Image: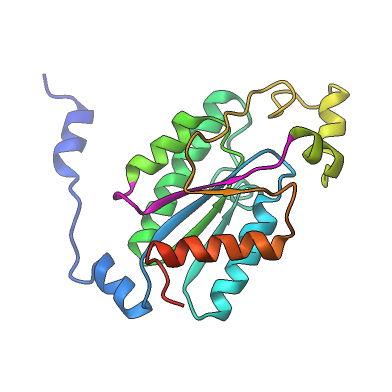
Amino acid sequence: MTTEANIKDENIVWHQHTVDKVFRAKIKQQRPAVLWFTGLSGAGKSTIAGALENQLAELGYHTYLLDGDNVRHGLCNDLGFSDQDRRENIRRIGELAKLMADAGLIVLSAFISPHRAERQLVRDLLPEGEFLEVYVNASLDVCEQRDPKGLYKKARAGQISNFTGIDSDYEAPLAPEVDLPAGELPIEALVEQCIRVLQQKGIINT
């Protein structure tokens, strides 16, 4: 039986353009990659990713930073924070990051992304070695003391539900490519750790 969905699938194909990922990366003198910063709210994901992007820009590399709050202003402004909406949020960001990597960019994505299965979903979208999981490793105590947006205080008061680390689980990475001790070292040292990994993996040459 032919359905509308079947017709759609049969008539949508990926068009391979002459200017491809390899060419785009070559003219940028870098290897495309997606650095996926994950960790609790307040761990420092966006701060570290932003500082790393500044460093890479100064070195002449081509990047784009996808920030959790910024994306929810547009692409994902129709989503809430239920488990289903969070999965869809990560799926959309994963597909967007994949397209940006296809453009030859070094993509820095800063999202709590609490579940291993969803982070694996994004990893599976990309070629081997192109996805780097960056665990911004700060304890719940440290993050709650920082509480830059006052969200932990609201969660403890019952004003926010499904808040990661309080009444919603966070599954820490088991074998991240980069493990940043964000509760112990200054930002400069954490950025330098990321730069070393990028050099070791041949993503940048500097």
Q: Quadrant of residue 40?
A: top right
From the top left corner, tell me how far across and down residue 69 is, in percent: 66, 48
Give the residues drawn in magenta, as a range.
126-139
Front residue of 100 and 203: 203
Q: From what the image shows, is residue 137 above or below residue 33?
A: above
Q: Residue at x 88, y 24 (%)?
A: 157
Q: From what the image shows, is residue 60 above or below residue 45?
A: below
Does the magenta-highlighted stretch encompass residue 130? yes
From the top left corner, tell me how far across and down residue 193 is, in percent: 58, 60
Q: Is residue 45 left or right of residue 142?
A: left
Q: Quadrant of residue 52?
A: bottom right
In this rendering, the count of numbered labels is 0
Q: Residue at x 82, y 36 (%)?
A: 144
From the top left corner, tell me how far across and down residue 78 is, in percent: 58, 38
Q: Is residue 142 left or right of residue 6?
A: right
Front residue of 159 and 2: 159
Q: From what the image shows, is residue 115 above or below residue 61?
A: above
